[in-house]
Image: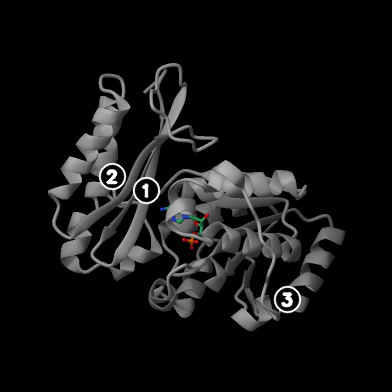
């Protein structure tokens, strides 16, 4: 695997690959890689001739300076892991390389970003759209792989790809979980032992809500989840929403819906975690 830090170097490689008719798969990440990332990379390696991974902790998508400063950075370990999954190129630029000038471009995603992560993390999706657009221009992938763990991010990137006519296929990979149900996340590395034991309660709350979807009202399920989680020490619920999986707009009644998404965000100690579950009401 070749590690590349300069945009110009990667552009030259991509041009040569595309001229040679190679199909490029791309997995953008912020590093501190775990099995969730590795599954995206393995899917890319299976479905493309060449796989490019990026590791870049993107400052413009953090609305909280301490979250940015404390975000785990483990590049040497990431390189070792990438070597196990047939990744061909790692793009690991520094912030000056990606943002030689401050970006003043503003994206707006309307209703899609007015809820959940967009509502609670002002500017977050503007930063996501900025970095994803830049990376798509530099890497020019045929297929780009994102995780369902960040469901709203997938919806935003889907709209970005359509609106700006990026010529690529977006692949949404299912959430990869630890044995106890906790969604894998780089931020899990920041949990202490007690918090790590409590964190799977988020997934338990989602499963409880899923179980009750056919029997109880949306309001009843929301208060049940809130009540359940107030009993967990060190856990502070930020939101729990039952939404349409494509528009992400909150539902007040699930009857008539084929699918719904259950989305949750909570602080476990100082660490903010998110998770979701998409439920097919006709099958599940
Ligand atoms: P991140 O490094 O957290 O920005 O994540 C990079 C990509 O990996 C994003 O598309 C995430 O949605 C995806 N990802 C992160 N955690 C998981 C997981 N547990 N399962 C599946 N995909 C994930």
Quarter of the picture containing the C terminus is top left
Whether residue 245 can be seen here? yes
Residue 221 location in percent, x, y?
26, 31
Q: Circle 3 sits in a helix, a strand or a loop, which is it? A: helix
Q: Are marks 1 and 2 in contact (CB under 8 Å)?
A: yes
Upstream in sequence: badge 3 or badge 1: 3
Q: Are marks 2 and 3 in contact (CB under 8 Å)?
A: no
Q: How has the structure been colored for display?
A: one colour
Q: Is residue 153 left or right of residue 277?
A: right
- Among the 4 quarters of the image, the one containing residue 59: bottom right
Q: Which residue does the numbered mark 1 point to in the structure image?
A: 275
Upstream in sequence: badge 2 or badge 3: 3
Q: Is residue 258 left or right of residue 227?
A: right
Residue 124 location in percent, x, y?
52, 61
- Please name the residue shown 60% across and 45% down the image: 110
- Among the 4 quarters of the image, the one containing residue 45: bottom right
Measured in 3D between alpha carbons, the distance from the residue under mark 1 to the one under mark 2, in whole angstroms, is 7 Å
Observer-nearest of 216 and 88: 216
Q: Which residue does the numbered mark 2 point to in the structure image?
A: 203
Q: Circle 2 sits in a helix, a strand or a loop, which is it? A: helix
| Residue count near mark 2 (Cα–Cα under 10 Å), binned few <14, some 14–19, many ≥20 | many
| Residue count near mark 1 (Cα–Cα under 10 Å), binned few <14, some 14–19, many ≥20 | many
- Please name the residue shown 17% across and 42% down the image: 228
Residue occupying the far right of the picture: 19
């Amino acid at each position: 695997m070749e590690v590349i830090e300069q945009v110009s170097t990667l552009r030259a490689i991509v041009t040569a690959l595309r001229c040679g008719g190679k199909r490029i798969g791309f997995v953008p990440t912020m590093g501190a890689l775990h099995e969730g990332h590795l599954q995206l990379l393995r899917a890319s390696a299976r479905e493309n001739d060449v796989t490019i991974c990026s590791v870049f902790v993107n400052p413009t998508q953090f609305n909280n300076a301490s979250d940015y400063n404390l975000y785990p950075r483990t590049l040497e370990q990431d390189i070792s892991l990438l070597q196990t999954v047939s990744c061909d190129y790692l793009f690991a630029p520094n912030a000056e390389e990606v943002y030689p000038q401050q970006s003043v471009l503003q994206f707006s995603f309307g209703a899609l970003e007015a809820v959940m992560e967009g509502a609670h993390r002002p500017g977050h999706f503007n930063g996501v759209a900025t970095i994803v657009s830049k990376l798509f221009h530099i890497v020019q992938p045929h297929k780009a792989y994102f995780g369902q763990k960040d469901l709203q991010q997938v919806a935003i990137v889907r709209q970005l790809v359509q609106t700006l006519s990026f010529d690529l296929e977006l692949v949404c990979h299912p959430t990869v979980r630890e044995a106890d149900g906790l969604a894998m996340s780089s931020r899990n590395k920041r949990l202490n032992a007690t918090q790590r034991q409590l964190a799977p309660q988020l997934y338990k709350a989602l499963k409880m809500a899923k179980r009750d979807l056919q029997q109880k009202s949306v309001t009843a399920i929301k208060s049940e989840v809130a009540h359940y989680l107030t009993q967990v020490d060190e856990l502070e619920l930020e939101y729990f929403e039952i939404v349409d999986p494509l528009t992400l707009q909150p539902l007040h009644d699930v009857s008539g819906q084929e699918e719904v998404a259950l989305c949750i965000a909570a602080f476990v100690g100082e660490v903010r975690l998110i998770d979701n579950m998409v439920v097919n009401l006709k099958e599940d």
